Amino acid sequence: MPRLLRDGARRLGASSAAVWALDPRSGWIDVFEYDGARGHARTLTASELGVDSLIGREDLPTLVEPRLSVGEVEDDHTTPVVCGGQSLGVLAVAVEDGRELDELERQLVADLARHLGIALENARLYEQAIRDDLTGLYLKRHFLDRLHEEIDRARRYGKPMAVLMADLDHFKRVNDERGHLSGDRVLRELARLILASVRSSDIVGRFGGEEIALILPEQAAAGARRAAEKVRQAVEASQFPAADEGPPIEITLSLGVAVFPGDGDDVDALLSAADQALYEAKRQGRNRVCSGGPTA
């Protein structure tokens, strides 16, 4: 996206360009901008846009156009980004001196919007192939691919890395007593909590059911345990919204920690060590972090 915006703006002689694109999974808007020198990306949540519910495609024009950040943009300089007959976003181009675009320039804007639409749709399709529909976390297959990559990188550069295995305690009770819709809400909120509690470089996947796995690149034993404890405390302190009329749901999380290379030097060994540590956390009473490695 930044490359397309940069090249398109340069061909037009535009001072800046921006695309506001709807992420249909989260209901948020991703903003890609080129300011004439370099590209930027940011995400705006529904609440930041003053919307109480998920943003739909039909909301894009009214939400986006008043907030365009590329300067004083005339209507002639905005165009919808469409692919497959679906509106994916809005492209805005700012031209110096606020001049009107000629016919060739308008065609260039339309061509740029078309290429941006294809890029966005390809990205959405790829995300659908690697992410879990319910939580938005990586699917197990993609997570394992990333784990192979991170182990290879850690081995090549002599760096540590850690794997966490996490499992909700007594989650079956939530489904049995509050219904599967409430259970789904708990899992969605759990994913959000975990992503908010770890670094942007950490990799989070759903292994199945209520089991979540994390890869912490360049994280040694002590740091990995601190990260696991931060996640555990965030879950313990939270009240999860239910789908029924009952009170919020309170639940806890158990975690197992394993560190490369001390606890395992390949994918199977590392996952097995993290899983055994998780089993020990359950055996000791749940709602705790156990480690398969040293204490320092």
Image (tube, rainbow, N blue to C red):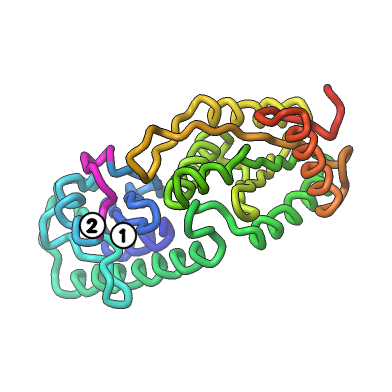
Task: State how far apart marks 1 and 2 are (Cα).
Answer: 7 Å
Outermost residue, bottom direction? 84
Residue 234 percent across, percent down from the top left: 54, 28
Outermost residue, top direction? 296
Name the amino acid type tagged 1: Ala
Say few, some or many: other residues with alpha carbon within 10 Å of mark 1 (under 14 / 14 to 19 / 20 or more): many
Q: On residue 9, which mark appears? A: 1
Q: Residue at x 81, y 53 (%)?
A: 267
| Residue 33 visible at all | no
Q: Is residue 33 left or right of residue 211?
A: left
Using the image as rendered, state which of residue 156 and residue 220 is in the foreground: 220
Q: Residue at x 44, y 36 (%)?
A: 240
Using the image as rendered, state which of residue 155 and residue 87 is in the foreground: 87
Residue 54 inside the magenta-drawn segment = yes
**Where does the magenta region start and end?**
47-56
Q: On residue 93, which mark appears? A: 2
Name the amino acid type tagged 2: Val
Using the image as rendered, state which of residue 67 and residue 5 is in the foreground: 67
Question: Answer yes or no: do the residues labelled 1 and 2 have beta carbons within 8 Å?
Answer: yes
Q: Residue at x 11, y 58 (%)?
A: 75
Residue 270 inside the magenta-drawn segment = no
